């Protein structure tokens, strides 16, 4: 919980810093901020369709929260995304958006009728499929980040024990140098970026499909 508040404070500070003293002709940090906004708007429009830029703030928030939450491990903090409560919370918000848009564009009757398609006997499976959406999204993100954290911790511990057994005469665990850095580069950086992008893309795909399912 504490790490989540730290991540939110960092994101808030970054937003305030990038938008401070904005000018009519963008340059420097303002140009960087506007470029990021345009990229998010284009990503949302290309994925969800025209007229969906109202979702851009939510998608940008997901991207930044997931990315910074996962990269917290680079600063000796437990990654926020390695907590199932965090990813499940994001997935439930996405699920609420999916349900809201299905009802908005199909009506209550159309939404309920969708559970009976293609035949009414499929209703239980359709309900399970609906519930599985937030569950799968949350566990996918959580599993990748928590799994990487566990693997890195186990390897670090094993290398420390091996270093003491083989090179115990040295003042530092020499075998811990090198491999953990490579693993950190993969699990902490590459996986963090990939999972943030995948979670956001799934959100856009599901919500976009709900809007166009009418």
Image (cartoon, helix red, strand yellow):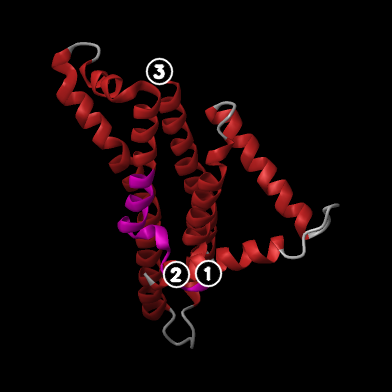
Q: Mark 3 points at which residue?
A: 214
Q: Residue 5 carries which label?
A: 2
**Magenta stretch?**
74-93
Nearer the observer, 53 or 119: 53
Q: Residue at x 44, y 26 (%)?
A: 211
Q: Nearer the viewer, residue 181 or 97?
A: 97
Marks 2 and 1: in contact by CB < 8 Å? yes
At a point 44% along the width and 69% down the height, the residue shown is 5
Q: In this view, does 157 lie above or below 53?
A: below
Element type at marker 3?
loop
**Mark 2 burial class by Cα count in 10 Å: few <14, some 14-19, many 20+:** few
Circle 1 is placed at which residue position? Answer: 9
Dot 1, how many residues are within 10 Å of its Cα: few (below 14), some (14-19), or many (20+)? few
Q: Does the magenta stretch include residue 144?
A: no
Q: Could you tell me how far apart the alpha carbons at marks 1 and 3 are, in whole angstroms? A: 40 Å
State whether the magenta stretch is mostly helix, strand or loop: helix
Q: In the displayed structure, would residue 169 be above or below residue 89?
A: below
Q: Position of residue 39 (x, y in %)?
A: 67, 41
On-image quarter of the C terminus: top left
């Amino acid at each position: 919980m504490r790490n989540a508040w730290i991540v939110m404070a960092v994101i808030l500070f970054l937003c305030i810093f990038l938008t401070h003293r904005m000018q009519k002709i963008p340059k420097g940090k303002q140009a960087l901020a506007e470029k990021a906004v345009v990229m998010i708007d284009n990503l949302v429009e290309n994925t969800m369709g025209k007229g969906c830029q109202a979702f851009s703030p939510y998608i940008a928030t997901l991207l930044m929260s997931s990315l910074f939450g996962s990269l917290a491990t680079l600063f000796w903090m437990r990654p926020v995304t390695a907590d199932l409560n965090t990813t499940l919370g994001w997935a439930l918000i996405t699920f609420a958006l999916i349900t809201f848009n299905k009802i908005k564009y199909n009506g209550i009757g159309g939404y309920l009728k969708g559970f009976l398609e293609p035949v009414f006997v499929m209703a239980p499976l359709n309900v399970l499929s609906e519930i599985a959406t937030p569950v799968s999204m949350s566990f996918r993100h959580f599993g990748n980040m928590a799994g990487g954290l566990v693997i890195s911790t186990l390897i670090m511990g094993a290398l420390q024990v091996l270093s003491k057994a083989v090179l115990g005469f040295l003042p530092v665990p020499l075998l811990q140098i090198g491999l953990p850095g490579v693993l950190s580069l993969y699990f902490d950086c590459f996986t963090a970026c990939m999972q943030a992008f995948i979670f956001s893309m799934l959100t856009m795909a599901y919500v976009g499909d709900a809007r166009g399912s009418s």
